[in-house]
Amino acid sequence: MKKLFIILGFSLISVLCFPQWKWQNPLPCGNGLNSVFFTNISIGYATGDAGTILKTVDGGTTWTIYSSGPGNDLKSVYFTDVNTGYAAGSYTSGNLILKTSNAGVTWNTIYSGTGGWLNSIYFPDFNTGYAVGVAGVILKTTNAGSTWTALSSGTTHQLQSVFFTDDNTGYSVSDYGDILKTTNGGLTWVPLSSGTTNTLNSVFFTSANTGFVCGMNGDLLKTVNAGTTWTIDTNGLGPYRIFDSFHAMFFTDANNGYIAGTDYIDNVIFITINGGATWSTISTGINQGLTSIYFPDANTGYAVGGNGKIIKTTNSGMNWAQLSNGETSSALFAVFFPDAGNGYAVGDDGMVLKTTNGGAKWTQLPGVPSAILRSVYFTDASSGYAAGLYGAIIKTVNGGVTWHTLSTGTTFPFYSIFFTDANTGYAVGGIPSNQTPCGIILKTTDAGVTWTQITLDYSLTSVYFPDSNTGYAAGYTTNNGQGVILKTTDGGVSWNVSLNGANQAFYSIYFPNDNIGYAVGYSGIMLKTTDGGITWMNVSISTIETLKSVFFLNADQGYVVDDGGDILKTINGGLTWTNDSSGTWNGLTSIFFTDSTTGFAVGGGGTILKMGNGGSVSVEENKPSTKKFTICPDPANIKINIIPAKASLEEMVVTIYTITGEQVLNKQFQDQNQPELDVSPLAKGIYLVKIQEKGWVEVQRLVIDNHDINHYLYTFKPSY
């Protein structure tokens, strides 16, 4: 039986997000991109992981980044005209469809379901559309997304792609080699014989009778009789066929077609100019697999894929240029700034990146290619050290221009390095096995010329000194994985156990002062001490992700990052934590702040994020949940009042941003029931207002209309 889902007007959610954390590498972003669509050769969209929506209006030269929400995974995007578009995928609880009616400026949630996700969306006309996904789900709308009907597909397999040749005739393919066909607008679907059980990822028809399907293990199928029979290509793709996985295809006419894929050879696109009789490979120059391809005309095409890769052709695929860019796609494991301008990030393959302008631009330095680096520390703007696997410690005295390898006398891997002054430093490491010894602490007092070592039966991952004599090292016991913290009070001459037997291994330790410290690690473990390590208490952080790095600006304000891409923040000494939306799912490994408002996080895929101004800003209009604050008046011109749903406010911070995310006003209020804010300096337009109070954060839209300011000589205060 068909089930009708009606999304009422009051439940539409308009989503527009400007993350506090902005991409520095790669650009425009490093999130995986799943789908691309252009409404003409210049205006286009790409959607992907972590709710990513990208838009360009200049043929990919520049991109604007939006987020529909960090829990969203957008698999497919489709536009029916220059203003009207749809994105399908999933959110934290199930499947999701978004719609824009203003060329991507805002996106409304027009459908949300439970228990799965959507992989593909297609509209044969302006009003009629289909979305398919997990467990054989097929949804249909006949009123441009206002309502959606669940159709019976006859399969529980995951549907990967949907395509219609006319209003009634359509096809869908699945992860078990299914090809389904409807000839009555989706009312019924008939299985066709495909001849394969491999996953089929994409379906495309060049006419009512001629169509293609591609998928895993290089499967490429063709029909010339509207799906009655399918022929599996065994020769046309040459030696790549049996190894490659094809993710998407697109034809500009009956003869010219393109396949994008991954696995065997990442940097090629397959091209046919004779309707699939033969295929050739064209190099794209990238080493990430491609997930989606689209041609707005016969010459101009775009393809997207992993790690935010975007490429473009203007000559029918003969040559491809990268629109995305970045200094590296190697995993980064540590970031450090000796001052506000100069910063370094290190990682795999001896990768060393440097910025001299506070993160605005990063440049790859020579580094030491044989080193696999896990930690970096600079004692001043010129002198620095990086430590890594196989006993590697490298040093620079000229701001990273050149590096030389120091003799450590060991092959133990190092995971953390720390200096208390220009000459005195420590490096810790270990191996994840029951070998005795399995851990090591090195110390130098001559700026790395010589090192003394202590070996022990703990594998150590992090070291930190709040003063020159007092230091802590954290790690784990290799035979059971339990966390351990060591402490020295004599400058590393001797180390004693501060804590042993914690439930999980530790990966990072940090002390904002002599007494207060935090240790974080596997499966969301966080411990805190307020007495210099004499006692440790559990801190609840509401995550089971592995915490990789912790940093505190002072006793109250701190941050942690995890391998799920989260950045969590506290402003009350760890009592409560909020998600300071990073805008990515890439695993994050290190976080560092140069001041209270400027921070950096690095991680997988060459990820470098920089904290912007004022926090994650989103607008959710008409959401069916109770607002905690009301802004009056709205529209406004001279002043606004923030009216709380509950009285007795102790402290409130109000920040106003432009629609592009630029902070324009910020004010803190104490003990005011209805705080008043002067907005007369703001130009006419739409703004975002972020209100923070006692751990709550709410963002609302505000319209400033000062066209006739003399008309408004009072401040409206409703009585409550």
Image (cartoon, grey):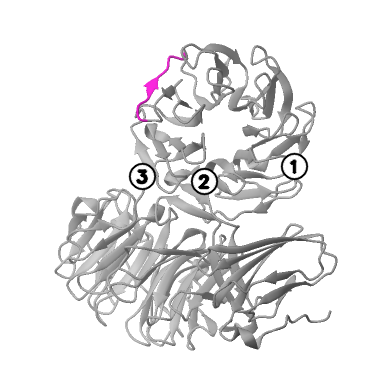
Q: Secondary structure at mark 2?
A: loop
Span of residues in magenta: 401-408
Can residue 277 be seen at all in this image of the molecule? Answer: yes
Q: Secondary structure at mark 3?
A: loop
Give whichever of discs 3 and 2 has the lower sequence position. Answer: 3
Q: Tell me the crowding category of disc 2: few under 14, some 14 to 19, or many 20 or more residues within 10 angstroms, Cα based.
A: many
Q: Tell me the crowding category of disc 3: few under 14, some 14 to 19, or many 20 or more residues within 10 angstroms, Cα based.
A: some
- Residue at which label 1 appears: 539
259 vs 641: above or below? above
Q: Is residue 228 left or right of residue 583?
A: left
607 vs 336: above or below? below
Badge 1 amino acid = Val
Q: Give the tally of numbered discs.
A: 3
Badge 3 amino acid = Glu
Q: Nearer the viewer, residue 349 or 254?
A: 349
- Residue at which label 3 appears: 327
Q: Quadrant of the C terminus?
A: bottom right
Q: Secondary structure at mark 1?
A: loop
Q: Is residue 363 left or right of residue 479?
A: left
Give whichever of discs 1 and 2 has the lower sequence position. Answer: 1
Q: Nearer the viewer, residue 376 or 279?
A: 376
Badge number at residue 587: 2
Q: Is residue 347 left or right of residue 318?
A: right
Is the magenta region chiefly helix, strand or loop? loop
Q: Is residue 643 left or right of residue 455?
A: right
Q: CA distance from mark 3 to mark 2?
A: 18 Å
Q: Tell me the crowding category of disc 1: few under 14, some 14 to 19, or many 20 or more residues within 10 angstroms, Cα based.
A: many
Q: Nearer the viewer, mark 1 or mark 3?
A: 3
Instruction: Residue 154: give x, y in percent of width and height.
Output: 48, 75
